[in-house]
């Protein structure tokens, strides 16, 4: 699985003019299931993100997790994270999981992140989504599991 994790002051996702998910202080997690990914990868990614220490402690060091700060996560599917740009000018996405499997793993991942104790809201898989965020830092982490 592949994820782009952003520490945010707030984030929201809108579909057809309606906010379908949002978070206050916490994480925006853009996630892509790759071909061959399964529940084991989703479990590992959820556990890692829940404990990822990218929030400041009292000394100003990134030493606290989203769990430590009582934050939440907005999880948004983004198959374009699988983009292969090595040749030509049009990215290829053949390394992404097929849509039905990608959706299943995405939903499983969101549930597993919630099971770690992180309040989770989500976007809508496959929809044309508008994502707004205020990146805090900025802090942006790329993660492959």
Image (tube, grey):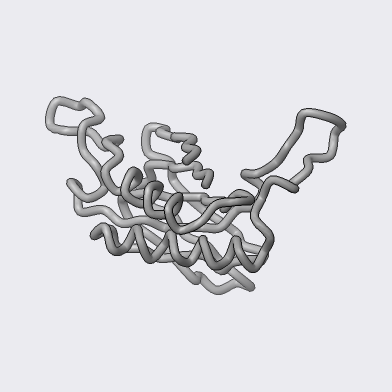
Q: Residue at x 38, y 48 (%)?
A: 44
Q: How many marks?
A: 0
Across and down, in percent, residue 141 comes to 44, 34
88 sits to left or right of 27 = right
65 sits to left or right of 5 = left
**Closer to the camera in the image, 86 or 68:** 86
**Closer to the camera in the image, 142 or 127:** 142
Q: Residue at x 83, y 29 (%)?
A: 87
141 sits to left or right of 36 = left
Tell me if residue 138 comes above or below residue 20 in the rendering. above
Q: Residue at x 63, y 51 (%)?
A: 35
131 sits to left or right of 25 = right
Tell me if residue 141 comes above or below residue 76 in the rendering. above
Across and down, in percent, residue 112 comes to 35, 61
The extreme left residue here reads 58
Across and down, in percent, residue 40 comes to 42, 53
The extreme right residue here reads 88
**Closer to the camera in the image, 110 or 100:** 100
Tell me if residue 108 comes above or below residue 32 in the rendering. below
Tell me if residue 19 comes above or below residue 47 in the rendering. below
Q: Residue at x 75, y 48 (%)?
A: 94
């Amino acid at each position: 699985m592949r994820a782009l994790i952003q520490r945010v002051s707030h984030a929201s996702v809108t579909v057809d003019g309606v906010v379908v998910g949002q978070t206050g202080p916490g994480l925006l997690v853009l996630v892509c299931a790759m071909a061959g990914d399964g529940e084991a990868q989703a479990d590992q990614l959820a556990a890692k993100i829940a404990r990822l220490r990218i929030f400041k402690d009292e000394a100003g060091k990134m030493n606290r997790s989203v769990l430590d700060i009582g934050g939440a996560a907005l999880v948004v599917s983004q198959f374009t994270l699988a983009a292969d740009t090595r040749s030509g000018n049009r990215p290829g996405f053949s390394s992404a999981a097929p849509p039905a499997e990608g959706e299943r793993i995405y939903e499983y991942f969101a549930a597993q992140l919630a099971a770690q104790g992180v309040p989770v809201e989500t976007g809508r898989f496959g929809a044309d989504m508008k994502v707004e965020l205020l990146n805090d830092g900025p802090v942006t982490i790329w993660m492959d599991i």
